[in-house]
Image (spheres, rainbow, N blue to C red):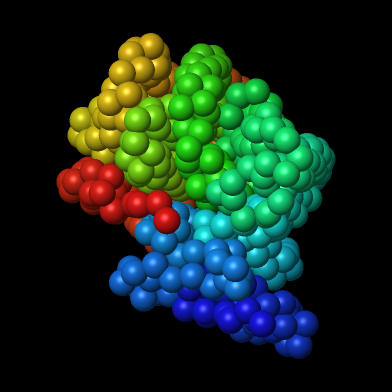
Amino acid sequence: MQSVDCVALGPALAPALAALAVLTLDAVLGRRRPGVRTALDLVAVLGVVGGLAALLPLTRGPRQTFCWSGGGCGYLASPLTVALQAVVLASALVCLLLAMGDRQASSGQDDGSRPELLLLLLTATAGACALAGARELATLAVALETASLPVVGLVALRRDGRGAEAALKLLLTSVLSFGLLVLGAALVYASTGSLRLGAPVSTRLGDLGAVHGVGLALVVAGAAFKLSLVPFHLWTPETYAGAPLPVAAFLATTSKVAGLAAVVLVLVVGAPGLAAAWAPPVGALAVITMTVGNLVALRQQSVVRLLAWSTVAQAGWVVLPLGGAVSGAVDGAVAASVAYLLAYVVASLTAFAVVVRVAQRHPDRSRHRLDAYDGLWRRDPVLALVLGFALLCLAGLPPGVMGLVAKVVALVPVVGAHAWGLAGAAVVNAVLGIAVYLRWAAHLAAVPDAALSPEPAVSGVGSGPAARPASGGPSGPASRRPDSFGPQPRTQRLALALAAAGCVALSLLPEGLVALLGGVTLP
């Protein structure tokens, strides 16, 4: 009988137990009773914070569980696992806080779906944490779907036509990607005779190297859907546009960590000896992904769609270091990917936190455009400062030193492998990325159209260009821009503060990203 190390499983068990507690409390107490919603929120937050606390014992050394008598284990809490789980739990905490405030702020009252929201988000977080420690294909497949399928329900919580359409597209994508992953896992099992990652190819039935290679490629393709790598990215803009904004933030951050974990485990843990074969195509895929993402993002006017295509471009940067995983530099390539992922997640969460805030007071809600940020510096200087800093971090421009260091770190393995073509294409895309984010940042200091009018707008009466309906009816871009911001839910203020503090901390102390190059090692 296999022994179970609960300490090793702690980061995944904490949110899973919290999800069970939310389900039980909702069933026993009823969601309409006073104080139940606060109790459920507290349990959910404690579940994620408990997962972060459970990481502390794992920093003392690797731990493993679900081991076989013949050698090898199905779950390993290595430094790579701890790093990925830390990013998963931290990003999930911010998304949870955003979602807790967004449900009430959007409608003015709780619509009764809070338990489902908490349950699905905690379940997806637990799956992403378990995925980071998986060391065999069955656990990897189950954990990846546990991290993915609950998000379909989260998207559908929007409860309108756009939400239903986005959830259906995400569901179909998840089913397709899972089919590819299972087919690839079957081929890997047929060629090795084992589900354990890294098992050697069997020679009993002849040369099965080609079957093994095709199996690995299909498993990576299934994981590439989650990471939004081209050509597996087409679901991304439509799903982000149809999902509630906190759920879109979860898809852009926590789900991307799960996707990277799956790709790294399959390639680096499952086939480290074949790095010379898979590194060049992965590098080419990274360049194509970032190029497509940046070029399409340059044409977007919708803020959510711009963030979606930005996610596609950033996914290319995340896997770019794996293109230099040759000549014994596999450890450094994986560490560079994790370091860039951390910087991207922190900056993206900060941007999403501001977008959630603007959408709550805008007549178009999540469908608002870039012109909604015209003059934000005058209306809310603090909010504009936070968003501007996050955009500079994503662009890699000072004072967003974090983004600049992350891009340099991502290029180190590529340059070390003398892949000058990849490095040159990445530099070109860095310039395109600057144009994408500065285009948005320029709106913060732009003069609003209403400010150009000689007469102030007054509650829908008057004549001349300044007059507009009090209800916010359409009368040009200025009429769709909020004039001021009311009080923000406390949980969202906390989420914004945590994300912004992460940006500032990593920009003031960017050596934290560099330290990951030596701190993340493979099992």
Give the image location of residue 497, x and y in percent: 35, 56
Asked whether the viewer can see residue 291, the reply is yes
Along the horizontal axis of the image, is 62 left or right of 112? left
Q: Quadrant of residue 240?
A: top right
| Position of 43 relative to 258 (above/below) | below
Between 90 and 219, the residue placed more toward the observer is: 219
Image quarter in which the C terminus is found: bottom left
Q: Quadrant of residue 70?
A: bottom right
Between 296 and 404, the residue placed more toward the observer is: 404
Along the horizontal axis of the image, is 7 left or right of 174? left
Give the image location of residue 446, x and y in percent: 36, 22
Give the image location of residue 225, x and y in percent: 65, 36
Image quarter in which the N terminus is found: bottom right
Q: Quadrant of residue 325?
A: top left
- Residue in the picture at 31% in, 72% down: 60
| Position of 85 relative to 242 (above/below) | below
- Residue in the picture at 61% in, 83% down: 35
- Residue in the picture at 73% in, 35% down: 206
Residue lying at the far bottom of the rendered structure:
28
| Position of 361 relative to 445 (above/below) | below
Between 518 and 164, the residue placed more toward the observer is: 518
Give the image location of residue 8, x and y in percent: 48, 73
The image shows a total of numbered marks equal to 0
